[in-house]
Image: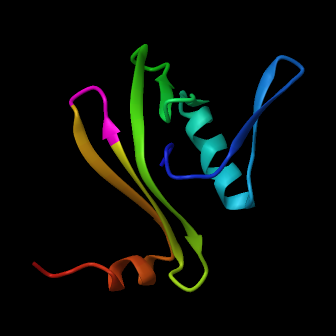
Amino acid sequence: MNLCHSLIIEEKNGKKQYSGSSADEECIMEFCVSCGVFYEGIDENKTMTVVNTLNNRTYKFRVVSVREYNSELGKMSILVEDLQDNAFKMYTKGASNKIFNSLRAD
């Protein structure tokens, strides 16, 4: 949830604020923050950093590909390499009926 977005981090009064193209994205990120999980940003090597304050761990993910939100498809996806275990993972968000319709039974 913390990786599949198009948010920009802004510093205001010493506090991080997330600005995005939709209120939904901002709301999801604020929920993550309230749970102690912070998106720290993305660097020049396309590495995203997420900090979990509940277990004091920092997680890094390399962005492989992004499919921006498309109203026709009704979803957005990101493919990342989890640098903790080098596994590739895809995260998708959007309209549940659109996501379910794109799944295969096998």
Please name the predominant secondary structure of the magenta segment in the image.
loop
Instruction: For the C terminus, give its image quadrant.
Output: bottom left
Residue furthest toward the left?
106
Residue furthest toward the right?
13
* Residue 101 located left or right of residue 5: left
Most foreground residue, 68 or 32: 68
- Place of residue 65 in the rendered image (x, y in percent of width and height, measured from the top left): 42, 54
* Residue 90 located left or right of residue 106: right
Give the residue displayed 33% in from the left and 55% down from the top.
Answer: 90
Give the residue displayed 34% in from the left and 80% down from the top.
Answer: 100
Most foreground residue, 2 or 78: 78
* Residue 74 located left or right of residue 100: right
Q: Is residue 20 above or below residue 22?
A: above
- Place of residue 103 in the rendered image (x, y in percent of width and height, measured from the top left): 27, 78
Q: Quadrant of residue 43?
A: top right
Query: Magenta stretch: residue 96 in it?
Result: no
Query: Magenta part of the protein: which range?
Result: 81-85
Q: Is residue 57 above or below residue 33?
A: above
- Place of residue 3 in the rendered image (x, y in percent of width and height, measured from the top left): 49, 45
Q: Quadrant of residue 8?
A: top right
